Each structure stands twice: as structure tokens, then as C-alpha cells.
Amino acid sequence: MSATFSLDDDSVVVIIGSGAGGGTLADELTQKGVKVVILEAGRHYTQADFENDEWAMFHKISWLDKRISAGGWHHAETYPNLPAWIVKGVGGSTMHFSGLALRFLPHDFETRSVYGEVKGANVLDWPIGYDELAPYYDIAERKMGVAGTQASGLPEMPPNNHYQVIAAGARKVGYKDISRPVASNTRPNDGRPACQQIGFCMQGCKIGAKWSTLYAEIPRALKTGLAELRPQSMVLRIEHDAQGKASGVLYADKDGKLQLQKARVVCVAGNSIESPRLLLNSASSLFPDGLANSSGQVGRNYMTHTTAAAVAIHQGPVRMYRGFDIAAVISDEAELKPERGFLGGYHLEGLALHLPFTAAFMKPGGWGREVTSALEQYDHMSCVWVCGEDMPQEENGISLHASEKDQYGLPVPVVTKTDHTNDAIMRRHGLAQWRKVSEAVGATRVVDMPPYPASHNMGTNRMSAKARDGVVNKWGQSHDLGNLFVSDGSQFTSSSAANPTLTIVALAVRQAEYIANAMSRREL
């Protein structure tokens, strides 16, 4: 039975956002006896709302409020108003994510120590290390049901034909680290069914086999009687008292009416665009540059992963669309190998697209025989997404437009991103290696595609040991306001080459433990 809390109840933890960070945090806190109010900007969709249709679901659940792409990245031309491909709804982008759940490697937490000073980049060590997070990775893999991991106990996802084609090519060129750790049940688990290999994983899993906070963490939190979910509640600013302590959250409800929910603790989990935007929009006389921004780092160091995509056309049918959307994941290139000419590494992730998205992403806005001749052989295609470490740069980030406002009267966010030299070299290397993998199993043609709108959004409120270097400490707690936390991927200090969702969940589990203990000691 879900709870109902008064707007004047200042004993609650207010969580802004309900995705991998916010949804997990709500579940973990309520299991520890903490009262929470979850404010979600989007609608509360159910599995009955999901359609096995790429464009229908894109328009239904995507965050399509206006944003502006700026900087030197490809999106400034191809996707000028859609820099990111994320979800606006209960469950956030856990509805849309591919399901791939990879851990960071130990060196990913120590980029400044391992890489040294990197010209043009703002690299920094995390204030935590892999060993400290490892037990929470175990919990996250168990919660999410990551197939093929010891923590979950679930068997590996069965190999579809797309997997077998990519894996065969990988082995022929000498790759050995080929896996498929996906957060989807391979047998009934956690009250959810086993995957039926429907293949529309990024359009919302109709049967609930793929993990999402929408139908896992959020319902579990509500059943405790300690959580209230308020969808269609767009948070406009975070309020604070005269002592600089967060005191409440101002939001517009589903009818557009302004409401002020008081709070004991505020946790921001709105993603790496909306979270810094909210902190900047919460500027006051006490915090003229925005909340938690004494360092000037709010909105900076935006990372999306260094990405590229390509399809290979084979001599026989592959039918990549059959089965779970993630095929073979080649991780050999994620290791540190500076002799390649770049720092960090990348994964080659087999990612199935259906025909509409293949046509849209292959050459945005383009047509002609070059495109149609490839699309005619769609059932012969395999597809890859290169996912590599993205160097943090101060000038890459989220800022507020000087004059343009959204439907709530808030400045539209400007998302600025330009490649670092390291990113560009890595991207070329990844595409070249994919070509080798494909040609090793007889591919007759490889078509490189520009990067998609960013679905991995990280940084902008990063962790740091020293307040001058970042926004939050090792617990995601603001350096400036002790009862304000960041609970999403915006707290990442580096991007690694791993998809971010598993790490977001692990950090949220750890953060919930810290908050609950601090509340019990009356430190919060």
C-alpha cells in the first residue's frame, strides 16, 4: 500500500527522478524504514503501454522537451534539438536501456593516477576505488538479475544468431573476452518471467523480463507503505533555509499547479542534463552560482562515452532482430593498451536495431542508392556500437540558455560537447576493428554510421575528494549542503568504457545505506 505524505512533512527524503538511481534509492531506503517522496517529471506508463514499434515508443516515452546541441560533436548538425536519447517517465531510462550491465575496471576509478595529466582533459581520481564498490556491484547484479554472473546465479543468455556471427569473427581475429552480461531474466526471477527473445528490448519490455525500476524497485518501495510516487511532477527548484540547508522542493504538478514539498533530505536523480540544470536553476542570494556549485563544476565535465556505430552486410541471413537486443560483447579492447595510441579502452557491443532505426541512423537525413542498397540487405546485417571511455573536459557540459524558456518558464538547457583528441583516435580504432571482425566471417560490405543521440549521460556533478574539484563527496553528498545528494550518473568522475547503469545502481545501494545510517544517528 503506497503512502500519502503532507506537503508540510519535513521528515521525508525527497527523491527527484525514478530511474536507475532514484528508483533504486527509493527501494533501498524504504526497506530500511525511511519515508520517501518520489517526484517524477514523466508519466506513469505500464507494460500495457509498451509497443513493439521503435518509432511509436520513441515518441511515447522519450524526453522530447527542447534541448539544444552545441559544440563540435556530430549532434550539433544531425540532432540539433535531441542531444540525448533518454526517457521521461516512471522508471526513467531503465525502460529504454539495452540491458547491458558491465562493471567498471579498477583503473577507471584512478584515471588521474594512471594516466597522469592529460592535455585538454580534466581527469581526476574518484574518491572511492573498485574494491570499495565491488560488494555493491554484487548486490546490483543480484537486484537487476544480470545473466551469467555469480552474484545473480542466473545462467547466461542463450546465443542468438547475431551473437554467433559476431563471436565467430571475434575469435578469428584473436579476441577472447566475449560475453553477454545482460540484466534480463534467463529463468523466472524476482517475480518476473524469463526472457522470451522478443527483440524490442529498448522499447520497453512488455513481459518484464528485462530489469527496470518501473516494475521492480518502484512497486517494491510502494508496498512498504513508506513511499509516495508523484508522476508528472516537474521539479523547478530546490529550496534552502537561512543556514544553507536544503529544506524543500518546488514542483509543478500534473495540472501545472506549483507545489512545495518540504524535506529532511533531497536526492537529485534526474540524469546528467536535468540534474545540473536543476542545481543551476536553484541559484539564490546565498548560492548565486547555483546549489552545490562553490567549485564552479556543476554542469561541467559532461561525458557520453566515445561512440560510433556500423553495420556489416554478410553473405547469408543474420536476422539480428531475432532475440535479445544485445548480442556478443567483445571486451578485449577495454583493457589499458597505450600502444594503440590512446588512453582508456572500449567495448565492441553487438546491438540489434530494427529496420526503421537502421534506416534513420545509417545516414541521418540521407537517401539514395548508397543507403537503399544497404537496407535491401537488412536481414543480412550485423550491427555494432563502439562504447569507449570519454575524456572529461570542463568546457563540455550543461548550461542555461540566455533567453529561450521551456513550458515551465525555465531556461532551456544547452548541451555542449566536443571530442577530445583521444576520443577521435579511439573511435577510428574501434570502427577499424569491427571491420576486421566482420570481414573475418565473410562480410561483403561495412557501413560506418555517425553516433546516435547520447543514451549514456555522465558527469556534470562529479565526485571529488576535495570540494574545489567537484560537486559531491564519496557518498554523492554535496560538498556545500550536507543534506543534498546526487544519485545518478552525473556524479561519475570518469566514464570508463562500461555502460553506466550497473554502476549507478551500485552507487545508489551504497548511498542509501549511508543516508539511512546518518539519519538514524541524527546526522541528517
Image (spheres, rainbow, N blue to C red):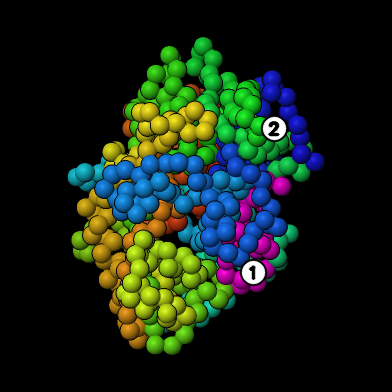
| Horizontal relation, residue 230 to residue 115: left or right | right
Above or below residue 21? Residue 323 is: below
What are the residue bounds of the magenta stretch? 194-220
The answer, for residue 303, to whether it is visible in the render is: no
| Horizontal relation, residue 248 to residue 281: left or right | right
Residue depicted at 62% across the width and 34% down the height: 233
* Dot 2 amino acid type: Lys
If the image is split into quadrants, where does the N terminus sit? top right
Disc nearest the viewer among 2 and 1 = 1
213 drawn magenta: yes
Residue depicted at 44% across the width and 77% down the height: 378
Q: CB of mark 2 within 8 Å of CB of mark 1?
A: no
**Image spot of residue 514 (x, y percent):** 57, 35
Q: Main secondary structure of the magenta part?
A: loop
Between 449 and 487, the one lying in front of the other is: 449
The answer, for residue 382, to whether it is visible in the render is: yes
User: How dense is the environment of label 1, judged by Cα within 10 Å: few (below 14), some, or many (20 and up)?
Assistant: many
Between 103 and 446, the one lying in front of the other is: 446
Name the residue carrying label 1.
Answer: 195
Residue depicted at 58% across the width and 64% down the height: 53
**Circle 1 — which element?**
loop
If the image is split into quadrants, where does the C terminus sit? top right
| Horizontal relation, residue 307 to residue 257: left or right | left
Name the residue carrying label 2.
Answer: 35
User: How dense is the environment of label 2, judged by Cα within 10 Å: few (below 14), some, or many (20 and up)?
Assistant: many
**Image spot of residue 63 (x, y percent):** 51, 46
* Dot 1 amino acid type: Cys
**Image spot of residue 65 (x, y percent):** 49, 42
